Image (spheres, rainbow, N blue to C red):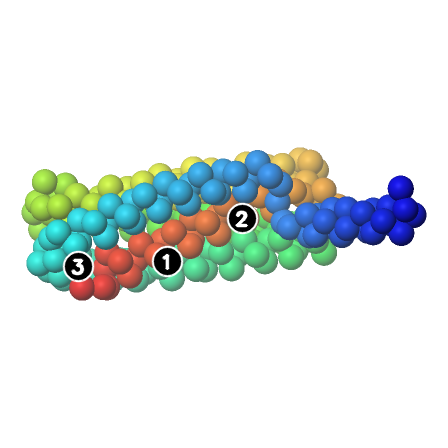
Amino acid sequence: MNPAITQEVTTEKFSFTTKAKNIPGNLAIWAAILAEMSEFAVMFMVYFLAKVHNPELFYEGPTRLNTTAGTANTLIMLTSSFFVVRSVMAIRSDQLKQATRWLWGAVACGMLYLIIKYFEYQWNATQGLDTETNIFYGVYYYVTFNHFLHVGWGSAGLIWVIYRINTGIYTKTEHEGLINMALYWHMIDLAWITIFPLLYVIR
């Protein structure tokens, strides 16, 4: 083979490998994120189809929801993502204690989100709103409860990462698990940022 061609192929292979290494996380977490985002995409498709066929219900529906609770949870999710980013920055600076403190902050945000969502559901019940009220609230409960579950096991995942940092498994040079969990948490945050305007704001 022509040496010039061989060198070109080798260079392209090296370039591809370098770019792949620059992508955070591993293939498994990106496959999981793709699967989760596909699930939420299906939910959003159901939302839009239902809205097209029931415009009046989807116009009135958001007006009866607790927008304050939804707004609070949006701020909480954004704050939690900030905490997770700071944790990654801390571990890369070999500040392991700071990394776990930021993660505990994210866990606290996750727990607060779940508590607010629980009381929001209770408030809805007192207003006579449930899955059988109409199709808007059926979609609302289906989407938000699914996200509720994601926040729950995402918070558990953050605690698992904290444990691995405290036991010395994750260090400054080896913390791919934290990166993977950070990516997953940002996906949960992104899903809520999409859910909030669709269900609470847009008429």
Which sits in the foreground, 105 or 196?
A: 196
Residue bearing the label numbered 3? 62
Q: CA distance from mark 2 to mark 1?
A: 15 Å
Q: Earlier in the sequence, mark 3 or mark 1?
A: 3
Residue type for callout 2: Leu
- Give, as a three-letter code, the residue at label 1: Ile
The vertical placement of 146 against 19, above or below, is above
Dot 1 crowding, Cα within 10 Å, few <14, some 14–19, many 20+:
some
Q: Do the residues bearing badges 2 and 1 touch, measured as CB atoms within 8 Å?
A: no
- Image quarter of the N terminus: top right
48 vs 152: above or below: below
The amino acid sitting under disc 3 is: Pro
- On the rendered structure, is 71 left or right of 2? left
At 69% from the left and 36% from the top, the residue drawn is 169
Q: Residue 162's quadrant in the figure?
A: top right
- Residue 153 in picture, x, y percent from top left: 43, 37
Q: Residue at x 83, y 47 (%)?
A: 10
Give the spatial CA distance, label 3 vs label 2.
Answer: 30 Å
Q: Which of 16/63 is in front? A: 16
Crowding near pointer 3: few (<14 within 10 Å), some, many (20+)? many
From the viewer's perspective, tell me whether residue 49 is left or right of residue 185: left
Residue placed under numbered mark 1 in the picture: 193
Determine the secondary structure under disc 1. helix
Q: Is residue 71 left or right of residue 175?
A: left
Among numbered discs 2 and 1, the one appearing first in the sequence:
2
Q: Is 30 in front, or is 171?
A: 30
Relative placement, left or right, of 163 versus 192 is right
Residue lying at 43% horizontally and 60% vertically, measured from the top left: 78
Mark 2 lies on residue: 183
The extreme right residue here reads 3
